[in-house]
């Protein structure tokens, strides 16, 4: 039970990382071909976004939530931006606000996120009066034409009641990423990256006059590669490969080490120049291997997800993207196709 609680808590803290406002087109290529929306509020690639005065982006999905972000040039040609994601004022509310500022070769993003619900599922129990509040700061800088760095720090606090127990969980996150560009040419771009994400949780539970404390941690080191290849004037290929190593430890649980591997392939095809694009991709997650300190080694499962979508260029300023994903691991039924969810994103420059 304690191990499950640790995993749930660490998973919840992930929402306070500065999530990219990914477009439906980026999703269609299984996250391999980075478009303009990917660079939005991104502390590393923000300078790749070209616009005259203002760039606006929104992504609408089928989960009754949405987002809206905009960036503009300041008088001294720096870039300032603001982003929101969430569902505003529903009974179970989720809202995240990010402020962004980019100058010279560096950028800074600050984020505040809140989850609030009268009833939430936590630690295999129903948590009432659930509140999850936190913030994150992220800084990125270009060292030279080949090397760039990202640093991030965050803190969040979870409070509520499980049965007669008051809970108070404090979570700290820290991360850094090193990018190294192998080649940057007109038709070929390749990068290596090394990423570290640390999550450190301190839990306190109070029942009457009895207080219990416990600590958990999760450290993830990921090495990977990105490749973008312009096959011809109409067809672009993207590759993303990553191997994360996750170490989980804590009070009264054994230390576990998980080795995983993910590879994604994507294609973008221009059906009609400056008017219509088709994107598709596949993400493959190979079976992970979990090394338990005091138990037998465990093997995970193989997962695959297929994506497809279209992008429409409206006039010279507006782009509309539509995508969907299909997970065939447990078979595909006609109802699955009929009830398929779609992602819609729209961007505009002025």
Image: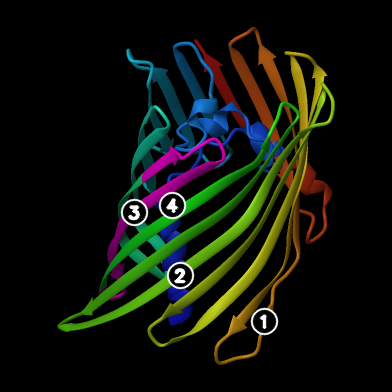
Question: What secondary structure is found at the residue carrying circle 3?
Answer: strand
Closer-to-camera residue (54/139):
139
Q: Nearer the viewer, mark 4 or mark 3?
A: 3
Q: Position of residue 234 (x, y in %)?
A: 82, 23
Give the mark, 1 or 3, whose residue is nearer the N terminus.
Answer: 3
Tell me the CA gap for discs 4 and 3: 10 Å
Give the quadrant of residue 221.
Answer: bottom right
Tell me the CA gap for discs 4 and 1: 28 Å
Residue 307 is a magenta residue: no
Q: Residue at x 42, y 23 (%)?
A: 71
Helix, strand or loop for the magenta stretch, by majority: strand
Provide the residue designation for mark 2: 218
Provide the residue designation for mark 1: 298
Position of residue 157 relative to residue 148, above or below, is below
Question: What secondary structure is found at the residue carrying circle 4?
Answer: helix
Give the mark, 4 or 1, whose residue is nearer the N terminus.
Answer: 4
Which mark identifies residue 154? 3
Give the mark, 4 or 3, whose residue is nearer the N terminus.
Answer: 4
Residue 322 visible to an observer of this rendering = yes
Say if mark 4 contacts mark 3, CB within 8 Å.
Answer: no
Furthest toward the front, the residue is: 144
């Amino acid at each position: 039970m304690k191990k499950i609680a640790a995993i749930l808590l660490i998973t919840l803290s992930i929402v306070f990382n500065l999530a990219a406002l990914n477009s439906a087109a980026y999703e269609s290529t299984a996250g391999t071909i980075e478009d303009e929306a990917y660079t939005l509020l991104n502390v590393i690639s923000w300078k790749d976004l070209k616009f005259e005065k203002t760039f606006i982006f929104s992504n609408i999905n089928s989960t009754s939530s949405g987002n809206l972000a905009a960036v503009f040039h300041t008088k001294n040609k720096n870039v300032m931006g603001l982003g929101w994601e969430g569902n505003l004022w529903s009974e179970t509310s989720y809202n995240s606000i990010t402020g962004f500022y980019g100058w010279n070769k560096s950028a800074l993003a600050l984020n505040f996120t809140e989850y609030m619900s009268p009833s939430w599922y936590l630690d295999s129990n129903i948590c009432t009066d659930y509140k999850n509040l936190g913030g994150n700061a992220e800084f990125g800088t270009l060292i030279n034409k080949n090397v760039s760095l990202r640093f991030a720090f965050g803190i969040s606090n979870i409070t509520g009641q499980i049965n007669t127990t008051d809970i108070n969980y404090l979570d700290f996150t820290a991360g850094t990423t090193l990018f190294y560009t192998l080649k940057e040419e007109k038709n070929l771009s390749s990068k290596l990256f090394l990423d570290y994400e640390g999550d450190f949780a301190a839990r306190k539970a109070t029942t009457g006059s009895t207080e219990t404390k416990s600590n958990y941690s999760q450290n993830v080191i990921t090495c990977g590669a990105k490749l973008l290849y312009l096959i011809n004037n109409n067809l672009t290929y993207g590759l993303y490969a990553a191997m994360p190593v996750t170490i989980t430890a804590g009070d009264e649980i054994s230390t576990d080490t998980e080795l995983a591997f993910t590879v994604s392939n994507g294609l973008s095809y221009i059906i009609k120049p400056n008017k219509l694009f088709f994107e598709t991709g596949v993400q493959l997650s190979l079976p992970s291997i979990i090394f338990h300190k005091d138990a037998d080694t465990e093997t995970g499962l193989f997962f695959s997800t297929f994506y497809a979508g279209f992008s429409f260029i409206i006039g010279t300023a507006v782009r509309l993207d539509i995508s969907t994903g299909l997970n065939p691991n447990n078979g595909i039924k006609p109802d699955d196709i009929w009830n398929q969810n779609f992602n819609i994103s729209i961007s505009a420059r002025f």
